Amino acid sequence: MNLRTRAAGLAAMLAGAAFSAQAYAADLIGQPTPGGIDLQPANSALAHSAHGFHNAILLPIITVISLFVLALLIIVIVRFNSKANPVPAKFSHNTLLEIVWTLVPVGILLFIAIFSFKLLFAYHDMPKPDLTVKVNGYQWYWGYAYPDQKIDEITSVMLSEADAKKENLPYRLAADASMVVPVGKTVRVLVTGQDVIHAFFVPAFGVMTSAIPGRVNEIWFKAEKTGTFYGQCTQLCGSDHAFMPIQVKVVTQPEFDAWVASKAPKSAPVAAVMAPAPAAAAPAAAEAAPAPQKIAQIDTASKPVGLN
């Protein structure tokens, strides 16, 4: 009875821990969860497809293969050790067995390829983009530019530990500027590097591509929910490789429009006010202009022929 009570208590504790982990994970959408063993919650159709490919295709196959190999190892250890089988067999080949262990892996790979090619096609079959963001990788920070909105490159640098704690943000993931995109819109991301090879990776969107100097790679995503989502450079790009996080802020369309308006240049009104001054001085300049012109004509006429 005591053993049953302990077992029930242990089961309740494990259930509570699992519930707490799920609740804690819900608070960490868009970033890694301490102690988590699953993929980050998906926030795009591509990420959902990638998760389905991993969980429904790859994971069952590798589980079955691992259990099968484990069973073979146990059989070999138990039945074919020196005590249980002191006289080893003399044969070295089995044609049927060799055909089977060649065809079965080929069949497994062909089965995986069917779903893999479908997923790869989805990644390359980008719908008509609603927004284009140019991403530049530097040692060691990111730059985001919006050519459609006429927004020049915005530099995004990792927050210090003190600033991250002050704003209650994850250290080494939070940055001082975000890549801001609207929710439910197809975002085309053009990625390149300016010094060495970097990698643009945001797990919640299921996208990753290399940032290579002299080359532009293209990826896309369509965020399903608003929020802040984090990623990192996944290429060994130098001593500060671990200090160039990616911060993507997904907002509503009105919020995005307001953000774009806040990035508009502020110097245009000043130029408009200063413009009338040269026009007012134009008549005086016109009256003073003939004198130099006459002098020039006289000087030109007085020069000997053939001299410049």
Image: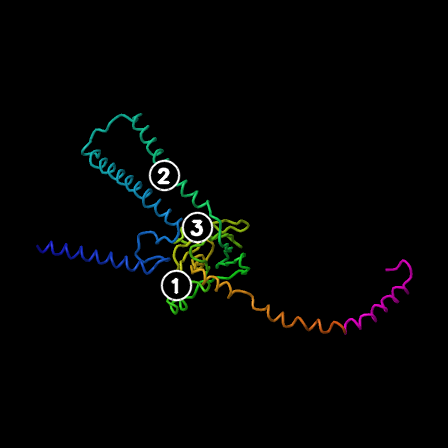
In magenta, the rendered stretch is 284-308
Q: Is residue 58 magenta?
A: no
Relative height, residue 126 to residue 9 (above, below): above
Give the residue at mark 2: 112
What's the residue type where badge 1 is placed?
Tyr
Gap between marks 2 and 1, in whole Å? 38 Å
Of mark 1 and mark 3, the one earlier in the sequence is 1
What's the residue type where badge 3 is placed?
Met
User: Which quadrant would the N terminus be assigned to in this image?
Assistant: bottom left
User: Which quadrant would the C terminus be assigned to in this image?
Assistant: bottom right
Relative height, residue 254 to residue 237 (above, below): below
Give the residue at mark 1: 171
Gap between marks 3 and 2, in whole Å? 21 Å
Of mark 3 and mark 2, the one earlier in the sequence is 2
Mark 2 burial class by Cα count in 10 Å: few <14, some 14-19, many 20+: some
Mark 3 burial class by Cα count in 10 Å: few <14, some 14-19, many 20+: some
Q: Are marks 3 and 2 in contact (CB under 8 Å)?
A: no
Relative height, residue 281 to residue 208 (above, below): below
Of mark 2 and mark 1, the one earlier in the sequence is 2
Q: Quadrant of residue 11?
A: bottom left
Q: Residue at x 36, y 52 (%)?
A: 42
Mark 1 burial class by Cα count in 10 Å: few <14, some 14-19, many 20+: some
Circle 2 SS class: helix
